[in-house]
Image: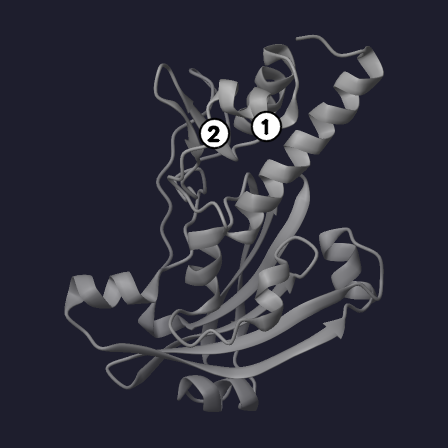
Amino acid sequence: MKEAPSGMKHLYQRIRDDIEAKIMSGEWPPGYRIPFEHELMAEYGCSRMTVNKVLSTLAVNGLITRRRRAGSVVAEPSTRQAVLDIQDFALEAARTGTVYHFKVVHRSIDPIDTAAAHRIGLPVGTEMLYISTLHVMDDVPQAFEERLISLATVPEANGEVFKDAPPGTWLLRRVPWTDAEHIVRAVNADSTMAKRLQIRTGAACLVLERRTWQAGAFVTEARITYPGERHHLMGRFSPSVKGSSAVQ
């Protein structure tokens, strides 16, 4: 089966958009089997070359994993590529035998200001979900998280109340990211943050800022403040090139 060049380009984009939409919406969760090439060919009335090109692009962008003879599946969200992983408090609590709970302190949909637009590279006024969460273990506050979520990239977040899982965990289960950026800095707690974390005003805190993208589309920005005396952040990694003289 052959298509004209213009038809091929149109079908390629249509198939890619359809598959990406199903992955991004969570309709096809991590591990879900993508229809086989012959199934997509029949559904869209296109050639194997067009289907193969779509799947290859999705694999390069980290959305799917192609397995020889077994077909393709939606890729598992990965944190192993990050030098620093954002802590999954629920998993940490289960590992250490502590009791974890979280509280959504603030949730609203608002346009981003100039500073946020500059950080994430989107137009001023773009609507985002703003959500703040307090993470608590054994009744002791462990971190305060302030997060932006792109409603354009993750539209289902618009109606999510985050009752069963905190925003970070909820996102990781649904949206595979392909690029991340970290910034770590030290701050002194102001009176508001001190009250939230039950520490003294002026106490040292660690702040981890993380921004993630999925195939060039902004997903989320998280700003997590940890009481300095209760936490340390560690990353383990290797030089990307053998013999590299990268800063250590």
- Who's the residue at 66% across and 8% down the image? 1
| Residues tagged 1 and 2 counted as in contact (Cβ below 8 A) | yes
Mark closest to the chain's N terminus, 1 or 2: 2
Q: Height in image: 142 above or below 88?
A: below
Depth order, front residue of 235/168: 168
Q: Alpha-carbon neighbours of circle 1 within 10 Å: few (<14), some, or many (≥20)? A: few
Depth order, front residue of 232/159: 159
**Outermost residue toward the top?**
2
Q: How far across and down, in percent of the image, does residue 74 sit?
A: 45, 37
**Outermost residue toward the left?**
97
Q: Is residue 214 visible?
A: no
- Who's the residue at 38% across and 56% down the image? 233
Q: Is residue 165 visible?
A: yes
Depth order, front residue of 64/148: 64
Q: Amino acid under label 1?
A: Glu
Residue identified by numbered label 1: 43
Q: What SS does tag 2 mark?
A: loop
Q: How far across and down, in percent of the image, does residue 218 sit?
A: 66, 50
Residue identified by numbered label 2: 35
The reply, left or right, for residue 222 in relation to residue 36 is right
Q: Amino acid under label 2?
A: Pro
Q: How far across and down, in percent of the image, does residue 230 sit?
A: 32, 72
Q: Height in image: 51 above or below 87?
A: above
